[in-house]
Image (spheres, helix red, strand yellow):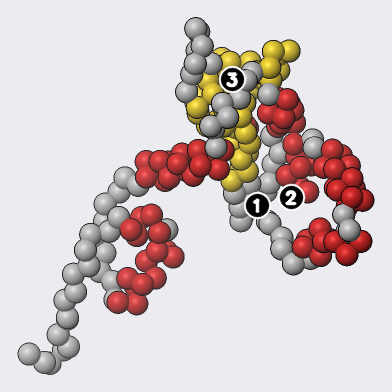
Amino acid sequence: MPGALREMGLEDAASAARLKVSAALLPSLRDASRTAAQRFHLDAPNWFREPQTPELLPAVADAVWDDRRITARYRRGETEVGRELEPYGLVLKAGVWYLCARAVRAGGGGSFRVYRIDRFASVEAGAERFERDEEFDLPAFWAERAEQFARSILRAEVVVRLTPQGVRALPHAVGALSAGRRSPVRTRRTPRAGSR
């Protein structure tokens, strides 16, 4: 993901790492990364929206990489709130960057939360490193939070009449999660005009 690495300010480090790994590989495997890049391509940004790199993404990425606590100002609607965070990981979802971090409480501890990087007004990394919770699993945490979010936005209830073909196409039109929450399908034949 060269574009994502560039946005985080890690392109040079990744390039150097790729060269070192390539030099250590057997000659038959040295071309594997270029070969894979010609066969698989990840296009993360969403359709119909110009991708924008949040200004503070490189600073947040550095803190994630170095396990450094950050002090951040975060916009919530019209207000800004201050947070002390332990940044555990970054997620790029449909062209939007998110930080998964533990919000530090006075006296220790804190809960893991998700923050949109483009809503940070300021970020300052401290000299203090935090000790990562080795049981934290970024992909599992993100999957759980993404599912919670998807369920939270399903608020409307509708009654729709569909043909059998429409029932099969429903998950593609409204998303599998919404389609999965449908009531049992009841079928009723509509009599043709002129028949009894």
Image height of 83 relative to 192, above or below: above
Position of 83 with respect to 148 (left or right) is: right
Camera-side residue of 90 and 53? 90
Tell me the CA gap for discs 1 and 3: 26 Å
Q: Amino acid at mark 2?
A: Met
**Residue 47: which quarter of the image?**
bottom right
Pick the residue in front: 7 or 109: 109
Q: Residues within 10 Å of mark 3 (few under 14, many from 20)?
A: many
Left-right relation of 19 to 175: right
Q: Could one spot residue 97 in this view of the protein?
A: yes
Q: Residues within 10 Å of mark 1 (few under 14, many from 20)?
A: some
Helix, strand or loop at disc 1?
Answer: loop
The residue identified by callout 2 is: 1
Q: Amino acid at mark 1?
A: Ala
Disc number for residue 44: 1
Element under disc 2: loop
Across and down, in percent, residue 29 comes to: 85, 61
Q: Position of residue 184 (x, y in %)?
A: 21, 63
Q: Residues within 10 Å of mark 2 (few under 14, many from 20)?
A: few
Q: Residue at x 18, y 69 (%)?
A: 186
Is residue 126 rendered to the left or right of residue 114?
A: right
Please tell me whether mark 3 sits on a helix, a strand or a loop.
strand
Residue behind mark 3: 85
Q: Are marks 1 and 2 in contact (CB under 8 Å)?
A: yes
Please name which of the two marks, 1 or 2, marks the residue nearer to the observer. Answer: 2
Mark positioned earlier in the residue sequence (1 or 3): 1
Residue 99: image location, x then y, percent: 60, 32
Q: In the displayed image of the protein, which residue is found farthest to the front?
A: 26
Residue 119 appearing in the image: no
Q: Which residue shows up at 55% across the image and 37% down it?
A: 137
